[in-house]
Each structure stands twice: as C-alpha cells, then as structure tokens.
Image: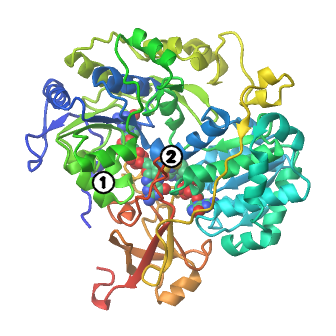
Amino acid sequence: MRKRDPKIYRRLTRPLVRDSRDEPFRPATWDEALSRTAAGLRAARGAFGLFSCARATNEMNYVAQKFARVVMGTNNVDSCNRTCHAPSVAGLSAAFGSGGGTSSYAEVEETDLVVMWGSNARFAHPIFFQHVLRGIRNGARMYAVDPRRTSTAEWAEGWLGLNVGTDIPMAHAIGREIIRAGLANHAFIRRATTGFEEYRRLVEPWTLSLAEKVTGVPASAIRELAHAYARAERAQLCWTLGITEHHNGTDNVRALINLSLLTGHVGRHGSGLQPLRGQNNVQGGGDMGAIPNRLPGFQDILDPDARTKFESAWDTVIEPHYGLNLTEMFEAMEEGTLKAVYCIGENPAQSEADSEQAVRRLGALDFLVVQDIFLTRTAELADVVLPATAGWAETEGTTTNSERRVQRVRAAVTPPGEAREDIDILRDLAARLGHEWKYTGSEAVWDELRSLSPDHYGMTYARLEEEQGIQWPCPDPHRLEPTYLHGRLWADDPAERGRRAPFGLVRHDPPVDLTDETYPIRLTTGRRLDSYNTGVQSGGFASPLRRGEYVELCPEDAERYGVVVGEEVQVSSRRGSVRAPVWIDTALRPGLAFMTMHFPDDVDTNRLTIEANCPIAGTAEFKASAIRIDRLPVATVGS
Ligand SMILES: Nc1nc2c(c(=O)[nH]1)N[C@H]1C(S)=C(S)[C@@H](COP(=O)(O)OP(=O)(O)OC[C@H]3O[C@@H](n4cnc5c(=O)[nH]c(N)nc54)[C@H](O)[C@@H]3O)O[C@H]1N2
Ligand SMILES: Nc1nc2c(c(=O)[nH]1)N[C@H]1C(S)=C(S)[C@@H](COP(=O)(O)OP(=O)(O)OC[C@H]3O[C@@H](n4cnc5c(=O)[nH]c(N)nc54)[C@H](O)[C@@H]3O)O[C@H]1N2
Ligand SMILES: [Mo]
C-alpha cells in the first residue's frame, strides 16, 4: 500500500489548484482558487452535493446548508452523521417526533441502572464515561451488551457478549421477559404509547432459550438484564454504533426504544435514551439543517409553513422535497447525475464502506472542491483545495454535544498561513455566485439562526456564556426547560401529552455479508482510545500509546490459523484485500475479528467493509463483514 508522505500531516496553509487531475497541485492565490471554485460550481447547478463538517461550528454548518439551498438551489447536503447516528435520529423521530438524545449527562450520575449497548464509551466517549463512573460510585449498576469484552464492559456488573447483528433478538427477548414477568409499566403503556398488543405478539416467539441460541448469550444473563432494567426506578439506555452501523440500524434503534416504552424509562429525570453522538458537533450539524430533510431547528422541509418562513428570510425558493443523503449522493455519482461535490471537513475516500468504490466515484466527478485543514486522501482527488481554520481553538462559534447542550467555542490560536474561516470562505464564494451575505462574525450568523429556530431562540451568545452552555429546546430567553425531553408523555392532561409514542414492529434480519467456508470470520470494526477516525487529525504525531493497525483475533483463532502476534497476514473480504499484522486479544470470541479505521494509509480497512445500507437512514453495515485470513508465503513475511 502507498505510504503517505509525513508532510501530509502538516496543516494546509495555502489554496491549491491544478488544471487537470494528472497534474500535481500548485499553490494559488485565494482569488484564483475561489474563481475556479465558483466556475466549477456554476457549471454544476442541478448536479451538485455538499458534504458539511461535523467538527466545525454550528454557525459554519448553518452557512454551509444555506449555501447549498440558496446559492446552489439544492437540499443535497449531508455529513458523516450518515455513517454513524442517522439511524438514531430516524428511530427517535419515528417514536417521539424529535431526533435528539432524551437525557442529560448529569442524570447518568443520578440513575440506578446504565445499559451500554453496542457502545465502547470508555474509549470513544471518555468524558461521558466519567459521568457513568460517578453514577456507579453513587450506586448505579451497569451492563454492557457488546460482542467484545471491551474496556467499557470491564467496568460493568454484567457483560452480554452477543453475536454481531443479533441485537433485535436480544431486545425482543428482554421485552418478552419483562411482559411475562409482569414487570411492564402498563399505566405508562396505556397513556403514552400505541401498538403494544402488536408488539406483545411480535416478541412472543423470542423465548429466552431461542434468544440464547441466536445471540450466543446465556438465557440467565438475558433474564438478569431484563429484570434489572424493568425493576430499576430510573434507567439510562445508551447506545452507539454497535446498534446503528448495520443494514437495519434504524430497526435496531426502534427495538431498544421499545424497551423504554415498555417500562416507562423515558421522559423522566434519570430515565432516558442516550445515543452518544460521534463527532464533537455532529448533533449541531443536523440541528443546523446540514442534512437533506430538515431545515435549521429540525424543521421538516416537507412542511410548507417552515419552507415559507425560510424562503422569506432568505429571499429564495426552497426545493419542496428531500435532498439526497450522503449515501444517495455516492449512488448518484455512479449514475452520473451528481457531477460536482463541495466537501468540507470530511474524508470519505477513507471513511466510506467499500472505499475502493468510493474513491473511484469521487475520482470520476467533473468537479471536486475540498475545504479542510489537512491534505486528506479525498483532497488528493480534488481540483481545488481550500485551507480552513480548525473549528477547534481557531474559530469563534458554538457547538452542540450529545446531550443537546450548545456551548461557545473560541479562537485562541492563530491559524497557520493563509487559512481562512470556513464561514468566510463560503460567504466569499456565495458573493461570486451572486449572493451578498453581510455576515460579520459568527454571532451574526447565530442570531439569524435563532430568529428562525424556536428551539434555539432563547440562547443568545451572552446567555450561553452566563449559563456555561444551554440544552435545546430553549424557546424562552428568560427560562430554562427541563434537562430531559418528552416529559409531556407523563402529563395527566391528554392534550398536553400530545402524540403517543408507537412501539416499533421490527424483525430480526441478520447481517448481509454472510460468513461461509471461504469467508469464515466475522469482522467488526471500530475505535481505539488513542486515535481518531481516519487518522487525519491523530496520525501525524508519534505516540507511545499508539500501536498502529492490526487484525485482532482471540487466542483460539490465532492457534487455529497458526498465526502469532506481529505476523503479517492477508485479510480478504468479498470486496477487497489488505495486509495487516496480527494482534491477539482476549476481549474477542472465536470467529470474531476486530480492526479499526484509524490507519488507512497502512491498512485500508474499508476496502473490506460492505456498502449494505439501512434503507431508512442510509448508514452502512460497517459492523459486520465476512473475512478470511491467509498466511503469507514465508519469503514475504515482514516485508
Ligand atoms: N478515541 C476515539 N473516540 C471517538 C472516535 C474515535 O475515532 N476515536 N470517533 C467518534 C465517532 S465519529 C463516533 S461515531 C463514536 C463511536 O463510538 P462507539 O460506537 O462506542 O465506537 P465503535 O468502537 O465504533 O463501536 C462500539 C462498539 O460496538 C460493538 N459492536 C460491533 N458490532 C456490534 C453488534 O452487532 N451489536 C452490538 N451490540 N455491538 C456491536 C463493537 O465491539 C464496539 O465495542 O466515537 C467517537 N469518539
Ligand atoms: N470501518 C469503519 N469505517 C467507518 C466507521 C467505522 O466504525 N468503521 N465509522 C464511520 C463514522 S461513525 C464516521 S463519523 C466516519 C468519519 O469519517 P470522516 O468524517 O470522513 O473522517 P474524519 O477522519 O473524521 O475526517 C474529518 C476531516 O475533517 C477535517 N476537519 C476537522 N476540523 C475541521 C474544520 O473546522 N473545518 C474543516 N473544513 N475541516 C475540518 C479533518 O482534517 C479531517 O480531514 O467514518 C465512518 N467510517
Ligand atoms: Mo461517527
């Protein structure tokens, strides 16, 4: 595999352009780079998509989606939310009408039970995990549901090591057991939910012993978790990518939400549902409308009143239908109906499932502009590269975390070279394309957003500073709402209670990429504490902690394949093949392998993964591929 020149990890300091894709980049003035970008985009109206950055500020995401909708006339705007928590947003919206996590971090310290389901928060959400640990110190019990005995599971009272892709059987068996044991909260079910009878019938076949057979978890452990969850006075059900990164991710999410509806563990202080979001501002990016189906403030594009409000504020016409999501944009590239992409702070050439296919599609675009802080592999495919300031420490603005808390971030460091703020670049491009936006700084952008989003209206910069961050919804400048959502479900007055939450009638559907004799090993991919996503932001400095990429196997499998720690092997799936050294990890079980996505220049894990997408959310099944491992001929070992 082609090793990346280490200077790649130096910050971008000047715009780069080239006349053809065969030529190397040459530095250019901002004027030339913006002119070329404007020309490329002008030619692409009607066949354009924008990828927005989940690490950048709310203000930047607001301006980026406005650029797509107003300047380019399209709702084709999305971000890496599609690759991680889009199923959580879709599932929560279907159940409760709103896509946000329902609780606050502080409530985890005051709860009685924490379930970490498909979530390795000890590695991936270490700050949240500190709250969990405080909760445990305060007497809460914790269970972990994960195929691997993760670092998170080490802290748990019970670890349910299920087979990859068997979460619906597990959830349904828990639901059935709760009902059968007489532990369902029927008063809550009657007042706040619909579809219970159908749900009861749906889960009826999922006996503990059938679930044991399918999930691989002893019936007694499933029963224990069912009773612990239903009997707890307050319980937090937290999940992340182990649930969402499947071809049926939204169904998985619905299966978990059902458990909260069954027990009433939602809409009360200390009880709730927490999909821990991935990037520092992926919640905010969606809230700001940098998704194809919502305007800022999570207002539905199909709602004519919402559209009219934005049309008059922005003096434009908004397309009255949903745009393409990230996954659909890649499909449209294949079909030739999407010809130009403006990629801001995303590295899809390495983060998309089946990355060889993604690179081919990006390479075939008529025009690609990448705006980043580093020269990524995606940027290497571009016509123009624009150097931005980092959302972290170099830019004024706000971000929104998983508990919906909007917080100020500040420019504390001077940006390198000629790097410019994402918002300023977008504003100058808009001007070149005939739209004069008079923003002077991030607060003006924020105030425009506040005027259009009732959920954000009450949070001025001054107030965000005073309160050290405020959770949405915050419609009133003088009042704070409860820290949890959906308290309405408990209201005595049916009118106040509003729409009831439907049970999700979802069925088990195993992973698409089946294991067989040729590909006998289940590969799941994920994260380590010491590295970040495609490694662009974490790969550039030496760390004694970071050991690079490995294919991790359990000791029994290492013995079965006759491989030892450090030995390089060929890892192949039905899509492609990579070489990686072996690591032996007792957290794994026979038949299960683990790799990260952190070192794609050494080992491009996503050549192995399958682009089997959730039809509702568009998220790929990163968590379940079928692979084989082959020893290399002796002569090439270690080469
Ligand atoms: N250190 C670090 N922190 C990060 C990141 C990073 O790269 N590095 N990235 C950030 C981002 S973008 C995100 S989205 C989050 C992700 O945070 P997490 O979702 O917690 O991280 P992952 O390791 O991808 O996956 C979580 C767990 O899912 C389990 N799993 C796999 N398959 C299944 C299954 O079928 N069922 C169940 N129940 N579990 C399964 C895996 O074993 C793994 O332990 O982390 C964020 N935080
Ligand atoms: N195999 C496998 N693949 C996966 C996953 C998995 O679990 N397994 N997880 C998926 C998930 S959850 C995610 S979120 C994606 C992540 O996929 P990506 O978002 O494509 O990958 P990152 O490495 O996070 O890329 C972030 C980019 O943003 C740039 N950046 C940072 N801050 C700023 C800023 O302020 N402005 C600008 N303009 N740029 C900035 C960085 O330099 C970097 O290039 O990967 C997905 N891919
Ligand atoms: Mo993510």
Count up the numbered dots.
Answer: 2
Q: Earlier in the sequence, mark 1 or mark 2?
A: 1
Q: Position of residue 367 (x, y in %)?
A: 18, 39
Residue closest to the eye, 296 or 144 = 296
Q: Residue at x 26, y 58 (%)?
A: 4
Residue 144 position, x and y percent, is: 71, 59
Colouring used for the render: rainbow
**Residue 558 to residue 215: above or below:** below
Q: Dot 2: what SS?
A: loop
Residue situated in front as seen by the camera: 618 or 563: 618
Marks 1, 2: nearer the viewer:
2
Name the residue nearer the viewer: 168 or 56.
168
Q: Residue at x 39, y 75 (%)?
A: 571
Label 1 to label 2: alpha-carbon separation: 21 Å
Report if the beta carbon of the residue with label 2 is closer than 8 angstroms to ligand 2: no
- Check if mark 1's residue and mark 2's residue have beta carbons within 8 Å: no
Q: Would you identify the image quadrant in which residue 354 lies? A: bottom left
Q: Which residue is mark 2?
A: 616
Label 1 sits on residue: 358
Residue 336 in percent (x, y) is at 22, 45
Q: Amino acid at mark 1?
A: Ala
Mark 2: amino acid? Ile
At 83% from the left and 60% from the top, the residue drawn is 177
